Amino acid sequence: MYEEIFKKYTPEKENLIYILHEIQDTHPQQYISEEAVEWVAEYLQIEPSHIFGVLTFYTMFSTKPRGKNIIRLCESPPCFLRGSEKMLKRLAQLLKVKAGETTSDGLFTLELCACLGVCGNAPVMMINEDVYGDLTEEKLDKIIASYTGGEK
Amino acid sequence: MKFYRSHILIGIDDSSLAAGVKEIEALLRSELQKNNLSDEINILETGTLGLFGTGVSMTVFPEQVTYVNLTAADVPEIVSEHFLKGRPVTRLALKAPLKKHYDYNYKNRIVLANSGKINPEDIKDYLAAGGYEAWEKALLIMQPGEVVDEVKASGLRGRGGAGFPTGLKWSFTAPIKAEQKLFVINADEGEPGTFKDRLIMEGDPHKLLEGIMIGSYAVGATKAYIYIRGEYKLCIHRLEIAIKDAYEYGLLGNNIFDSGFDLDIYIKIGAGAYVCGEETALIESMEGNRGNPRSKPPFPGVQGAWQLPTVVNNVETIANVPAIITNGSEWYKGYGPDGCSGTKVFTIMGDVNLPGLCEVDMGTSLRTIIDEFGGGVKEGHQFKAALVGGAAGVFLPIERLDVNMDYNSLRNYAAVLGSGAILVMDERADIVDMLYSVIRFFRHESCGKCSPCANGNEMLYKLISKIRKGKGAPEDLYNMDKVAEAMFHSSFCALGQSLVMPIRSAIEHFKADFLKRIN
Amino acid sequence: MKTLAELRMIREKAQEEMKLRESNYLFKVVVGMGTSGIAMGSREVMKAILEEIAQRGIKNVLVTQTGEKGLSSLEPVVDVIEEGKPTITYGNMDIAKARKMVAEHLVNGKVVNEYVVSTENL
């Protein structure tokens, strides 16, 4: 069932991280299921345990179903100094979830992450592939609203 | 393009027109002409200068002197005093400059010379800026050994953190006879507060490629990889375009320009792990494994990825190489002090007025970087500390502000240049909180391979959390220091070894912050 | 796949084109499109500039993109380059400021001083 993805990569272990990225990015719940691991293990001829090891090592991968939009708020020292904890509080309030959780409507998953390299605009977060900088509570409200279609 | 030494911005709006700005401008032009200054001093009309009720006003750059309420009688005096003799007429000037105009310091840039100027997605822009001339020179005129020697002579040192001499690193791998050697770029920029490599890759991807080509040729590698963190989407996108164009222009591939040399460049994408900045962990990750570091020796230069001789260099390091080949090692040594030649990119953030980045001579003082390029400590606040070198760096107090930012000078203060990140904190910052954030980061990023680091981070996190909650005891400070020291001596890689620096410096210089929470 | 001689020709032509371009066009507008710029809204600024130029039917302006200069807190950053004059760098741009810049600077030839952050010869 992942032929389309497998076709792009030779069955070598060095392509594992690429394949996992692509499986996750194309899954509507942005995660890698146990079933997917079996398929990849079969294709690359490596042990599923190796793949689980890799999956759980890298923070960008998830073994749990996630929301449609992944919010990744940076908590590294530069963002921390500029108020990332306050931003986390606000996001948790807005979305009614804690870090690591998915909203009940499946629209957002709130995650914390390490430095995103946009520290001149701290505090910073990423939603999917877009970066938002110089965050304030008011700005967060607007950004989240833009993903929920404006209703509050 | 003509180069003017000064620019005059004259404000044209209703009130200045009413005050006769046009006549004064004409007079100014004729006075400049009379003194043969027309080619040196440029007059620009602008809208309002943002002043009210100041009649005819103008601002002179780069001095940033603003003259207000000018009359025809003042013009000859300004021309003869200010523009001829270089003495601004203070009697007529505003006391404070209108607004700080920023100098991007392009004249001193090497690795970021094109970033923010050229279109990174158009190879022709890079070519027009003299791009790939160094690659031509290296490939067609120089022997690989000569390239290694030139880089060695330049004194270029690794910009990723450790500061190892680049030419020396190359000289270990160059003589090895192997069927296949690899050249790898460490673009897993994850040190908190660091975004210099991102700017190079986003703003001038071809410069990195040109450096890779020269380096690969020097060590005899015919395959090169750029290992880039998965979060850097825009870098990946622009590098992909750049690599495609380089093939199309014959700069990569087989038998490049009939030299007999082949080279292919591939991108490898990470998936979020700070430890992969360590070169052997990076190699593990490239191979499709967990990014656990390997034991050294064998060093990657001898046995690296897939057991092949592998040279691993940082992005900023390699972005220096084209300019060294074009201009020679002597030219390069003109930048920075002895033993630390070249420029360095510093990222400045935190409680400063203008967070961002600058490229300056190695050895520029911390104070200069913060004041001139970071716009100084936030308006109305005082400097308290700077975390220098990233999370794996050192907290420096105000007494250390005049330290020169180079490998050797920082070592005198048990500090490191690291990645060149400078996180400034003003008096509102609490060092306990900051250290908590640093330790939390390391606890999350420890790979778990060796127990000193895995368990040590856990212990440190418990101790700092306890202190932060006001439940700490005086001996906790001593215990933190001892744990960090044990980690320094026994951890497998630099990740676990580094924590002693932020912890020790925080406690040494900002003990009051800790005692406040303990008592 | 190109030969060395072809590459050199392309380089020379590109160098000439840079000048030619600037004589065909009165202004070159360069929008900073690094991650910081985009995070602070440079895509919207770019769009507003292009729209405003199209709406006004301005023909002598070339709009292009670049990476970051390094001043994150001044993003989005826009350069206006005119042959023989210092580069005017505008900072903290937004859609409204971008539209005003087109009207004042590109149409009327007047620098909008309030938004200028640097006048370096780039």
Image (cartoon, coloured by chain):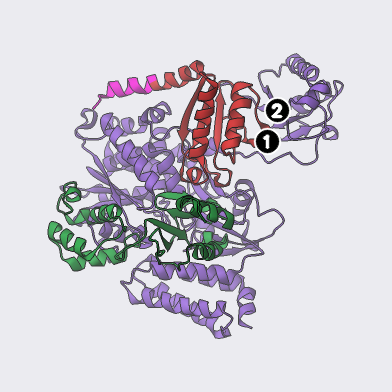
**Which corner quadrant of the image does residue A28 belong to?**
bottom left
| Label 1 neighbour load within 10 Å: few <14, some 14-19, many 20+ | some
Taking the spot 40% from the left edge, 43% from the top edge, the residue there is: B201
| Label 2 neighbour load within 10 Å: few <14, some 14-19, many 20+ | many
Q: Colour of chain C?
A: red
The label shown at residue B67 is: none
Which residue is label 1 attached to?
Answer: C114
Using the image, determine if residue B483 lies above or below residue C65: below
The answer to whether mark 1 and mark 2 are in CB contact below 8 A is: yes
Disc 1 marks which amino acid?
A: Glu
| SS majority, magenta | helix
Asked if the stretch drawn in magenta spans residue C3, the answer is: yes
The N terminus of chain B lies in quadrant: top right
Asked if the stretch drawn in magenta spans residue A18, the answer is: no
Instruction: From the top left corner, tell me how far across and down residue C95 is, in percent.
Output: 56, 37
Instruction: From the top left corner, tell me how far across and down residue B122 is, in percent.
Output: 38, 31
Find the magenta span and give its range: C1-13
Which residue is label 2 attached to?
Answer: B47
Q: Colour of chain B?
A: purple
Secondary structure, mark 2, is loop
